[in-house]
Image (tube, rainbow, N blue to C red):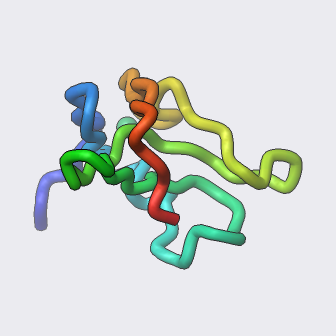
Amino acid sequence: MAERKWICDYDGNNLEPCDALSEACSTVALSKRKGVYIPTMSNRKTGEMRQPYAAIKTPVHPDGIIFGFCPFCGTKIYAPAGEQEKPDV
Ligand SMILES: [Zn+2]
């Protein structure tokens, strides 16, 4: 059995979530559902893909609220996206 990943890895561009955050994120289509998700962003100039933050959608905030840190392990995970970047979902 693989060792559990307790802490998120975050380098300012990419979030590699801890297991608790991964498990909280559903793989169901993101557009309408509620809950925690990690959007994939693409830079339109470079085509580079990254996952720079985690966010949560609620009935009050259907567009999502970005976490400034992992709600499970506390790692700081948010960096503002550049102007060229838009969520793919
Ligand atoms: Zn975490």
Q: Is residue 43 left or right of residue 60?
A: left
Query: Which residue reaches farthest right?
Result: 60
Name the foreground residue: 50 vs 10. 50
Name the foreground residue: 84 vs 49. 84
- Residue 30 screen position, x and y as percent: 58, 69
- Residue 29 screen position, x and y as percent: 55, 77
Q: Against 80, is 35 above or below?
A: below
Residue at x 30% of width, y 47% of height: 43
Residue at x 69% of width, y 69% of height: 33
- Residue 17 screen position, x and y as percent: 32, 46
- Residue 81 screen position, x and y as percent: 43, 32
Query: Which residue reaches farthest bottom?
Result: 28
Residue at x 56% of width, y 44% of height: 55
Q: Against 50, is 12 above or below?
A: above
Q: Is residue 44 left or right of residue 2?
A: right
Q: Quadrant of residue 77?
A: top left
Q: Against 20, is 10 above or below?
A: above
Residue at x 51% of width, y 68% of height: 26
Quarter of the figure with the N terminus: bottom left
Query: Which residue reaches farthest left?
Result: 2
Name the foreground residue: 14 vs 85. 85
Q: Quadrant of residue 80?
A: top left
The quadrant of the rendered image in which ligand 1 is seen is top left
Q: How many marks?
A: 0
